Image (tube, rainbow, N blue to C red):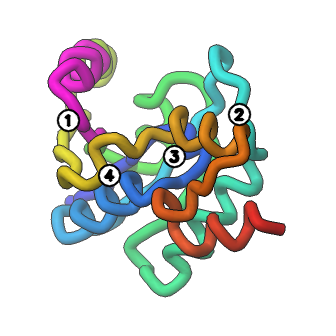
């Protein structure tokens, strides 16, 4: 059975923290699908199409990575793409508590889907899309937090 993993999130924007988690997860799975979720509780700054294109551009030479847009339950997206794992990045202890509750709920709904947690490297602990958006909206330089593809795109 192939080890297919879904890494869900809004990726608004894709940050170096996301890239760190994705790159470190690649050896663990046969296929890693970045699931760009539509969250009714969030108003994104960047379009779904833009976020999807960023992931596709960043990983254009990596056949193990794909990206999809989805709404609804993450476990339903897992079913639709054939994923048996969910990947989540953890920055702080309180992230783990929140993510564990979601993982427990997902396991209650679909018992065969396991959630894998990877802690981010220390240099990415403070890199959150929410903070990056705030700095960007207020005219700050966010280039140190973003992959080059994203930097080039937002400078246009």
Q: Earlier in the sequence, mark 3 or mark 2?
A: 3
Give the residue number, with chain letter if any, for mark 1: 114
Cα–Cα span, label 3 and label 2: 15 Å
Give the residue number, with chain letter if any, for mark 3: 35
Magenta part of the protein: which range? 88-103
Give the residue number, with chain letter if any, for mark 2: 44
Cα–Cα span, label 1 and label 4: 9 Å
Choose top left, top right, bottom left or bottom right for residue 125: top left
Question: For the point 44% across and 80% down, which residue is it?
Answer: 63
The answer to whether mark 2 and mark 1 are in CB contact below 8 A is no
Q: Residue 7's spot in the image, x, y percent?
A: 39, 47
Question: For the point 51% across and 35% down, which residue is it?
Answer: 131
Q: Is residue 25 visible?
A: yes
The answer to whether mark 3 and mark 2 are in CB contact below 8 A is no
Q: Earlier in the sequence, mark 3 or mark 4?
A: 4
Q: Residues within 10 Å of mark 2 (few under 14, many from 20)?
A: some
Image height of 81 relative to 111, above or below? below
Judged from the image, the secondary structure of the residue bearing numbered disc 3 is strand
- Magenta segment main secondary structure: helix
Q: Earlier in the sequence, mark 3 or mark 1?
A: 3
Give the residue number, with chain letter if any, for mark 4: 5
């Amino acid at each position: 059975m192939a080890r297919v993993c879904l890494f869900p999130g809004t990726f608004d924007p894709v940050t170096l923290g996301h890239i760190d988690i994705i790159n470190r997860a690649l050896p663990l799975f046969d296929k890693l699908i970045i699931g760009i979720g539509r969250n009714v509780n969030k108003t994104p700054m960047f379009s779904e199409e833009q976020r999807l294109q960023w992931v596709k551009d960043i990983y254009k030479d990596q056949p193990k990575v794909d990206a999809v847009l989805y709404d609804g339950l993450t476990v339903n997206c897992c079913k639709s793409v054939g994923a048996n794992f969910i990947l989540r990045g953890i920055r702080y202890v309180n992230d783990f508590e929140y993510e564990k509750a979601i993982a427990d709920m997902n396991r209650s709904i679909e018992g065969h889907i396991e959630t894998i947690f990877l802690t981010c490297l220390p240099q990415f602990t403070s890199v959150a899309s929410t903070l990056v958006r705030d700095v960007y909206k207020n005219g700050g330089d966010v280039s140190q937090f973003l992959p080059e593809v994203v930097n080039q795109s937002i400078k246009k």
